[in-house]
Image: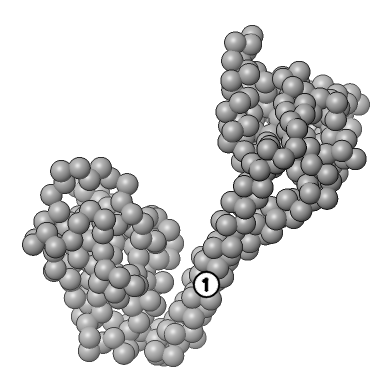
Amino acid sequence: MESNCVKWVRLGDYISQRRENNSSLKYGVDLIEGVNSDGEFQPTKAITDNINLKPYKVVRHGDIVYNPSRLNIGSLAYRTGGMCIVSHLYQVFYIKEKYQSILSAEFLTLYLRRSEFYRYVDYDNFASQRAEYNLRKLGELLIPLPSPAEQQKAVNVWRAFREIKVQNECKAAPLMQLCQSYIQELKHKYPMQEIGPYIQECNKRNDKNKYSTLHLKGVTSDGIFDRTKAKVQDLDFSNYKVVKKNDFAYNPSRINIGSIALSTEDVCIISPMYIVFHVNEAIIMSEYIELWFRRKEFQRSTLFFASGSVRDTFGYKEMCNVKIPLPPIEVQQAIVNIYKCANEAKRIAEEADRLSREVCPALLQHVIHS
């Protein structure tokens, strides 16, 4: 089979199953890994006490590993670096040595990690007793075999995106940790003060129905404003609260899981059950206090202070009683700047990850059909 100039071949002719296992118990539980749906190896989450490691399969550099029961959701990965061992339920294979110069294992991994292939696995497994895609079935697939140079183009693009992702993840983690460390140190350098004198509750309503469903938002547990998932048909928005830029809004029943956010939009409306307040920016930067709200310690404290109230809610009165260290504005700004750098690195990493999932499949299509 050919698509223009690209030859299609039977995959089973080009791969071999790795049959090496841990029968001699040479490798311990510290080397057990699994493959997640993002196509990444990760330490196992299974309980390993008194586990029999003999049937575990050995994975070497250059091997491709997949979970035959989860292949349809992307549980397939290419192994680089050191070896590991995986559950005997996994399938492990590699490109035959004589074909390694004409079929790239990384290219094959990209081809098998497409959503089109996942759908094909579901289709091929339909009505089977156990939805497992074994190596025999995988070997029956016809795959495209473009030139090594064309394969490498796709691999290079994928590597570039992954490198950007990894580099920025490595930047974001220590920056975020540094930011939290500084906040923790402030508790010992500056007196803790209640924020009540520096915040003002906002109770402006949408009484003239100036704003509609287009402006309706809610606050997620990730601390962001998002489109509401509630049913809004025939709903009267006249009592809904108006949230302006730099206002805080929080769900008093869910603030313990992070449902508080700082608005960056000019205006939106939110359920009247939310509490909205504004910060005196001359004393406290909104972004600085937002960092405090994002801390797990703060979220746990809201649950403690809400406990025993009529509905276990953390009302505006309780918010006014929150104590935080108040350093000079320039110190607050420095901490916020670190946080922004960490967030930007995280954003770039997420964007690179997204693009790798969108661009690489399109590039594969181009390579196959050009």
Alpha-carbon neighbours of circle 1 within 10 Å: few (<14), some, or many (≥20)?
A: some
Give the amino acid at mark 1: Glu
Q: Secondary structure at mark 1?
A: helix
80 above or below 67?
below
252 relative position to 127: left or right:
right
Which residue is found at the position 29% from the left and 86% from the top?
100
Residue 194 in sight here:
yes
Q: In the rendered image, which residue does mark 1 sit on?
A: 163
Q: Residue furthest front?
A: 189
Q: Nearer the viewer, residue 193 or 349?
A: 193
Which residue is found at the position 81% from the left and 25% from the top?
196
Position in image of residue 52 (x %, y %): 13, 49
Q: Quadrant of residue 85?
A: bottom left
Which residue is found at the position 69% from the left and 59% from the top?
341
Which residue is found at the position 59% from the left and 33% from the top?
297
Q: Nearer the viewer, residue 242 or 140?
A: 242
Q: Specify the quadrant that holds the N terminus.
A: bottom left
Position in image of residue 90 (x %, y %): 23, 58
